[in-house]
Image: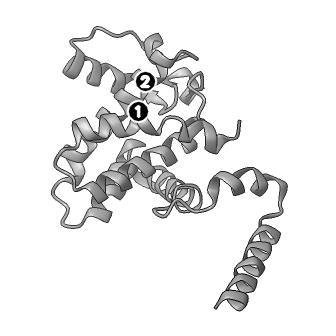
Amino acid sequence: MTVYQKVKSFEPLIRKYITVYFEILTPAEKEDLVRRYMSQIWQESQGNNAAIGDGGKSYGLGQIYFPTFNEINAKYFNSKYKHADILGSTAAAAELNIHFGILVLKEKYKSYAASLPEWPARLDMMTRRYNGSGSKAESYLQKVKKINREQFPPDGGLHPVTAPIVAGGSMLSVFLIAGLAVSFFLGVNG
């Protein structure tokens, strides 16, 4: 299974929690946020819920940082979960990690992004603040936006087909062949 397929498989859960916690957003904004969070999961863990980062302090798909986990757990769940609950290969651990990740975004939205006038700026601020602040957070934002453009564009793109081909270095030939096929079709039928 490619990274694209792994991350894409979490889309229904991401959509579920964005629908629950971001009712204020328009349908188009919710779609942007779904694609952006899939891009964040790609950047954070490449779709691996057993991933551990930040010197053992961040867990799972969304690399939920322990202090942030503790804050979200206390605020929304009366501290009923343990760090290990969001880590591992079970469907329940993956879902809980996504649930926590969307709640982190909700908190970042309320604290930093809600007052910004335009949606793209609010989306970028949530993404940036998900990873902290300063130059590392800005670098993180740019990486996530690149993944978003290349793997999860609004039109759906050709990405289920191209994601594994990119690793093989043949992307140019795929687009050339696709372009020739379109040109031929339009020339014959146009």
User: Tag on residue 1?
Assistant: none
The residue that label 1 is drawn on is: 13
Q: Is residue 82 left or right of residue 111?
A: right
Compared across the picture, whether 25 is left or right of 10 comes to left
Q: Residues within 10 Å of mark 1 (few under 14, many from 20)?
A: some
Q: Which mark is residue 95?
A: 2
Quarter of the image that includes the N terminus: top right
At horizontal 57% and vertical 62% (from top left) the residue drawn is 157
Residue drawn at x 41%, y 52% as measured from the top left: 134
Q: Which quarter of the figure has residue 80?
A: top left
Element at label 1: helix
Residue 103 percent across, percent down from the top left: 29, 33
Residue at (20, 22) in percent of width and height: 75
Front-lying residue, 39 or 67: 39
Residue 123 percent location from the top left of the image: 33, 56
Amino acid found under the numbered disc labelled 1: Leu
Q: Is residue 80 above or below residue 86?
A: above
Per the image, label 2 sits on a secondary structure element best described as: helix
Q: Earlier in the sequence, mark 2 or mark 1?
A: 1
Q: Nearer the viewer, residue 140 or 38?
A: 38
Rendered residue at 77%/81% (across/down): 180
Residues at marks 2 and 1 touching, judged by CB atoms closer than 8 Å:
yes
Residue 177, percent across and down?
Answer: 80, 73
Screen quadrant of the C terminus: bottom right
Looking at the image, how many numbered discs can be counted on the residues?
A: 2
Residue located farthest toward the front when viewing the structure as drawn? 189
Disc 2 marks which amino acid? Answer: Glu
* Residue 46 appears in the picture as rendered: no
Residue 87 visible in the shown view: yes
In the shown orientation, is residue 173 left or right of residue 105? right
Q: CA distance from mark 2 to mark 1?
A: 7 Å
